[in-house]
């Protein structure tokens, strides 16, 4: 069986390096849902060497910092499950006390309906948020060079 994260982008591409890419997941209920995907097929985080693990987590932290500064969410959820797709990827999801599932995980049961739609409740457009995430990741990449 092929790996979908080896053959598909996994979302709307925001920034890419030789090691990883960050995409925004198309999810109407959770519009500020980003995913860092390791480019080379790697099942587990500890399959990376120490330097690669550090680069990975610096990028995850950069995405989290932008989401916190730009959106002021109630919580940021970080997850690296890989039960369905055994390819190293991290979920970075801005959560709000008004979102459909809060405080449950995004994969759990909805707790309420959300009106207006979630993306309309964010303080900035998704394109602007993507640009801010991309800028932070580009700065992180250039700081390493």
Image (cartoon, rainbow, N blue to C red):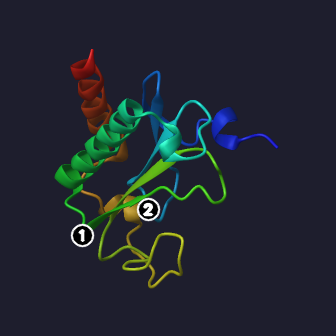
Q: Position of residue 12 (x, y in %)?
A: 51, 39
| 100 or 7, nearer to the observer | 7
> Dot 2 lies on which element?
loop
Q: Which mark is residue 30?
A: 2
Q: Quadrant of the C terminus?
A: top left
* Identity of the residue drawn at 51% across and 36% down: 38
**Hey, which quadrant is residue 121 in on the image?**
bottom left
Q: Position of residue 61 (x, y in %)?
A: 28, 46
**Hey, which quadrant is residue 132 in on the image?**
top left
* Identity of the residue drawn at 41% across and 32% down: 52
* Identity of the residue drawn at 32% across and 76% down: 98
Q: Residues within 10 Å of mark 2 (few under 14, many from 20)?
A: many
**Side (left or right) of 73 relative to 12:** left
Q: Residue furthest top?
A: 145
Q: Which mark is residue 116?
A: none
Residue identifier under label 1: 74
Q: Position of residue 139 (x, y in %)?
A: 23, 25
Q: Position of residue 19 (x, y in %)?
A: 47, 27
Q: Residue furthest bottom?
A: 111
Which is more foreground, mark 1 or mark 2? 1
Q: Earlier in the sequence, mark 1 or mark 2?
A: 2
Q: CA distance from mark 1 to mark 2?
A: 13 Å
């Amino acid at each position: 069986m092929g790996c979908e994260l080896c053959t598909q982008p996994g979302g709307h591409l925001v920034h890419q390096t030789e090691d990883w890419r960050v995409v925004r997941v198309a999810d109407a209920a959770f519009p500020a849902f980003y995913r860092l995907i390791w480019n080379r097929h790697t099942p587990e985080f500890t399959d990376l060497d120490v330097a690669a693990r550090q680069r990975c987590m610096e990028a995850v932290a950069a995405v989290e910092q932008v989401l916190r500064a730009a959106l002021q969410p109630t919580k940021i959820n970080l997850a690296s499950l890989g039960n369905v797709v055994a390819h190293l990827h991290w979920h970075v999801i801005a959560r709000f006390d008004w979102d459909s599932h809060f405080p449950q995980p995004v994969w759990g049961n909805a707790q309420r309906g959300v009106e207006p739609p979630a993306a309309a409740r964010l303080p900035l457009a998704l394109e602007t948020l993507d640009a801010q995430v991309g800028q932070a990741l580009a700065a992180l990449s250039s700081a390493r060079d």
